[in-house]
């Protein structure tokens, strides 16, 4: 049976898609390898959100060209496969096939073309992937990666923010039926998942036969055995009090909300096509803070969007300085050809985008550290991710707020999903403690 090498770039949506592709290949009898040299089929699931992501993908495709055996097949999937469909042949002619995010239904047929038998009875043993989160290999190898699971609830996006490539690569919004979502969540929980992330580009626009996102949260939240429920990503235009009320009701929902603001200037928000003002955003989070005190609010910010003035940038910096967000993902604007923002004028110089990014980033690091300091002296419940990648003598994991915690490896708690850790140090990146 062929062996498959699968590498994923980009967002959690891509991670979820890769998981789906892996399940399909597994059910046909394929095995997985971590070495591209030995694979029969190589799959690179790609991202096109910013230029940097694209550059990394092309760099990797170049490496794989020389690593792969001449007879093995190379498949490129994901957003770059869709965006660069026409130019991939000249930019990376050694790629054998492309499947965009809406074409995964054709994956099995492609494998059949490449000689994978599809008429055998499907294999129903649980998927086994080589994982970098291994302990000592063997039976423990898969333990940690099973604890968290991503479940898509929508596909696509039709918000068409003016900087964003996603609506072009992933197509219009489609909501998945609640039964299908619930049965996937149950299956993941049966396989050991403790934390489920409901995924969509804009989960707040979920709507299936009258059932909205707040309703879905209540339904999924009552699934037995599910310890932590969370969701990504919310759009401030569609995020509302009804969702906050549902979050306050659902017992096992993790105390965190990711609500990308992008900018704290109304002029920039309008140019971005974001459909809300700073005042509306602040009003929504005021209700959220009131109903859900102690939750972590995280955000995305783009620095140096076309037309952004020093004054606009200062407004964003000021909001971050005030400690509005517990954590922020901060990006320099990256023009994506085909999107309206790519041709807006004036564009901010790349150097200046970077300067603004660094200023916002350092303000956010201060806010994050201050947030973390509140946990010193407390005992927090951590979902383990296994031995720390930097130092195998340490363990790492995440709290319900999604704060990284590191503690010394200890045999008693090594195989526990949840570990109680007494916190004694706070940094901007996270917390350090001892098993309680
Ligand atoms: N340039 C910079 N950042 C972008 N994002 C999306 N498109 C771009 C772009 N062209 C950021 C937004 C979004 C996050 C997933 O990526 O902040 O919320
Ligand atoms: Fe892109 Fe805006 Fe849709 Fe998010 S909501 S995926 S930023 S278009």
Image (tube, grey):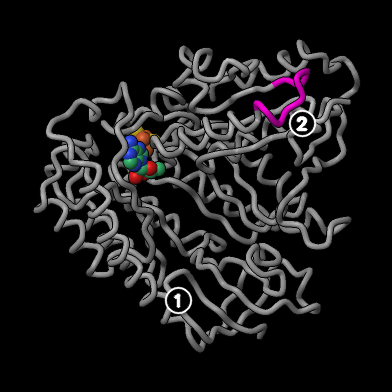
- Compared across the picture, whether 435 is left or right of 432 comes to right
Quarter of the image with the N terminus in it: top right
- Ligand 1 - quadrant of the structure image: top left
Q: Which residue is mark 1?
A: 427
Counting from the top left corner in percent of width and height, residue 366 is at: 32, 72
Q: Which residue is mark 2?
A: 4
Task: Classify residue 338 by image quadrant.
Answer: top left
Lower sequence index among marks 2 and 1: 2
Q: Is residue 370 above or below residue 257?
A: below
Counting from the top left corner in percent of width and height, residue 161 is at: 29, 33
- Mark 1 and mark 2 in contact (Cβ < 8 Å)? no
Residue reaching furthest front? Answer: 66
Which class describes the residues within 10 Å of circle 2: few (<14), some (14-19), or many (20+)? many
- Residue 21 belongs to magenta span: no
Of the pair 133 and 177, the residue shown nearer to us: 133
Q: Is residue 135 above or below residue 186?
A: below
Point 51% across, 59% down: residue = 250
For mark 1, give the secondary structure.
loop
Q: Which residues are magenta?
A: 65-73
For mark 2, give the secondary structure.
strand
- Is the CB–ligand 1 distance for label 1 below 8 Å? no
Point 40% across, 54% down: residue = 258
Q: Is residue 405 above or below residue 195?
A: below
Point 90% across, 22% down: residue = 121
Counting from the top left corner in percent of width and height, residue 146 is at: 72, 52
Of the pair 39 and 218, the residue shown nearer to us: 39
On residue 247, the disc is none
Point 24% across, 47% down: residue = 351
Q: CA distance from mark 2 to mark 1?
A: 40 Å
Of the pair 97 and 93, the residue shown nearer to us: 93
- Compared across the picture, whether 271 is left or right of 20 comes to left
């Amino acid at each position: 049976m062929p062996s498959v090498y699968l590498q994923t770039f980009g967002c959690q949506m891509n991670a979820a898609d890769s998981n789906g592709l892996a399940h399909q290949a597994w059910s046909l009898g394929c095995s997985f390898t971590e070495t591209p040299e030995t694979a029969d089929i190589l799959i690179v699931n790609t991202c096109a959100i910013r230029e940097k992501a694209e550059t990394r993908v092309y760099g990797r495709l170049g490496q794989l060209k020389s690593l792969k055996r001449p007879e093995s097949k190379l498949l490129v999937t994901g957003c770059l496969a869709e965006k660069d469909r026409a130019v991939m042949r000249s930019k990376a002619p050694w790629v054998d096939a492309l499947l965009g995010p809406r074409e995964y239904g054709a994956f099995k047929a492609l494998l059949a073309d490449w000689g994978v038998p599809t008429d055998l009875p499907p294999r129903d043993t649980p998927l086994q992937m080589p994982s970098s989160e291994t302990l000592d290999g063997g039976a423990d190898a898969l333990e940690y990666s099973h604890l968290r699971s991503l479940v898509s609830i929508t596909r696509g996006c039709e918000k068409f923010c003016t900087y964003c490539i996603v609506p072009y690569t992933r197509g219009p919004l489609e909501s998945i039926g609640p039964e299908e979502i619930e049965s996937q969540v149950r299956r993941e929980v049966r396989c050991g998942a403790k934390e489920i992330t409901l995924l969509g580009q804009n989960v707040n626009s979920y709507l299936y036969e009258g059932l909205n996102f707040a309703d879905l949260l209540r339904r999924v939240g009552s699934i037995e055995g599910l310890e932590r429920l969370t969701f990504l990503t919310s759009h401030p235009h569609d995020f509302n009090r009804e969702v906050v009320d549902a979050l306050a009701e659902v017992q096992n929902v993790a105390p965190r909300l990711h609500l990308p603001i992008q900018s704290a200037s109304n002029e920039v928000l309008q140019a971005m096509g974001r459909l809300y003002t700073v005042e509306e955003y602040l009003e929504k989070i005021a209700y959220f803070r009131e109903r859900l005190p102690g939750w972590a609010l995280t955000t995305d910010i783009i620095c140096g969007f076309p037309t952004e003035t020093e004054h606009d940038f200062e407004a964003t910096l000021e909001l971050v300085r005030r400690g509005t967000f517990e954590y922020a993902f901060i990006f320099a604007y990256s023009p994506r050809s085909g999107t309206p923002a790519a041709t807006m004028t004036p564009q901010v110089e790349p150097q200046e985008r970077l300067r603004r990014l660094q200023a916002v980033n350092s303000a956010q690091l201060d806010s994050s550290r201050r947030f973390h300091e509140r946990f010193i002296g407390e005992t927090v419940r951590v979902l383990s991710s296994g031995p720390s990648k930097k130092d195998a003598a340490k363990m790492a994991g995440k709290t319900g707020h999604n704060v990284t915690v590191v503690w010394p490896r200890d045999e008693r708690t090594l195989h526990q999903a949840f570990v109680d850790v007494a916190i004694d140090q706070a940094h901007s990146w996270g917390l350090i403690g001892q098993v309680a």
